[in-house]
Amino acid sequence: EARNRIQESMYRASRRLLSSQQKNTRVVLIDGARIPFSVSNSRYEDLMAVDLARMAIGGLMNKIGLDGSMIDYVLYGTVIQEPRTSNLAREAAMHAGLSKNIPAHTVTMACISSNAALCQGVEKIMANQANIILAGGCETFSDAPIRYSRPIRKRLMQASKIFAKQGLLGGLRLLQGLKFKDFAPEAPQIANFTTGEVMGHSSDRMACRFGISRKDQDDYTLRSHSLAQKAHDDGLYNEEIIPPEGSDDIKENGIRVSTPEALAKLKPAFIKGPQGTHTAANSSFLTDGASAAIIMSESKALELGLKPKALIKDFCFIATDPFEQMLLGPAYATSHLLHRNQLRLSDLDVIEIHEAFAGQVLSNFAALDSDKFASDYLNGMQKLGPIDIDKVNTQGGSVSLGHPFAATGTRLVTTAANRLIRDQSKLALVTACADGGLGHAMLLERYDAS
């Protein structure tokens, strides 16, 4: 038995050595899919996160027609964890009908959890630890775990022992010292643990710093909802959204095309008073949803006769000051990624950016075109310049489609790849911010078999 363990260790070491020699391994996106994103406490209110993940994974496998036993590893993201399914990746994979012999682990990196899952999959393939990876993410706010306060939890942990030894009278003594507020349940916090600040408040301050007006944000919001509605009306999401079990409806119920006048009437949701610019409308809403994608080594895809949608060219993750630049990650990550690849914004054909808030998107665009931001924070890199808005989120974004935290990243990548194919264009940028001052950017290239 000891010899077998040593041989297995040597085998793995030899595979790592081989992988270090495979510097030309190319990783491709085969396809991605998601169930319709829905406002929390609506369509999926009676389902667990694992149910949403199961539908996305199963739907994608059926769409591609891939034998599930061929998958080498499952990486799946979630942010608000249900204790009963703490390794949600493993549970969802098995419930979706994948082989029980496929290892899986769950990834959490706030709003870029499925981006991290995808990129960890790329790294596994490039390290020769896998050929086929299933990655994605899901979130539900309809079934968020709500717990008792700490004083109540401490007493509940003691209760069975106390009742066994002292009976009912002893159990009643556990109530001593409790305050009325201790009986109030604790819902998951949206505020950052370290800063204590809600992301909307941080984004509102950032928008003020970059001079983003309330009208700018409302105009962007109207654009997002209008484009999302048009994309659905034109059938552009038919290739991306799979209907949930028991339905053929792929409509998304968070899309609401309004008017400038109606948007202007809404009160600030975070910073109160005339200085506040973030409202319920120009912020992404609490959403339930799940997404999934299959990535492979190019050689494996060609061996199986599959046509990839995109080549994953490069990616990066960054971290910055969460107290002052909580959601400015896309400006940092995009700058680093494009400079590293000697690209300009004009070289990009498609841009998909996560819309946590309209003000956050516009602040990042302003930072990319700021000499001062580049001088102060980008270590000698030049500013990238203005964004061509006509390349950005042409099928809507998180403000209109919704933002199930860990599912958004795979949505962005799938939509970007489909846009590249539809437009017969070459390069796409996917970028997103995340709680904790984190950011991500990825470069995709439309796959060319030649």
Image: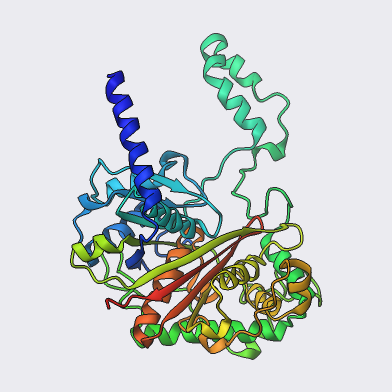
Determine the image quadrant of residue 126.
Answer: bottom left
x, y (%) of residue 215? 70, 86
Indicate how the structure is coloured in the image: rainbow
Q: Residue furthest toward the top?
A: 165
Whether residue 276 is visible here, answered yes or no, is: no
Residue at the spot x=34%, y=66% of the render?
Answer: 28
Tag count: 0
The quarter in which the N terminus is drawn is: top left
- Residue 375 vs residue 360, the one in the foreground: 375
Left or right position of 352 against 438:
left
Left or right position of 121 against 269:
left
Residue at the spot x=65%, y=79% of the render?
Answer: 384
The quarter in which the C terminus is drawn is: bottom left
- Residue 223 vs residue 102, the one in the foreground: 102
Q: Is residue 269 above or below residue 17?
A: below
Left or right position of 186 against 374:
left
x, y (%) of residue 70? 22, 52
Residue at the spot x=26%, y=62% of the render?
Answer: 299
Determine the image quadrant of residue 382.
Answer: bottom right
- Residue 170 vs residue 41, the one in the foreground: 41
x, y (%) of residue 205? 77, 69
x, y (%) of residue 402? 50, 70
Q: Residue furthest toward the right?
A: 274
Whether residue 240 is visible here, answered yes or no, is: yes
Determine the image quadrant of residue 132.
Answer: bottom left
Residue at the spot x=40%, y=81% of the render?
Answer: 419
Q: Is residue 107 above or below residue 223?
A: above
- Residue 148 vs residue 326, the one in the foreground: 326
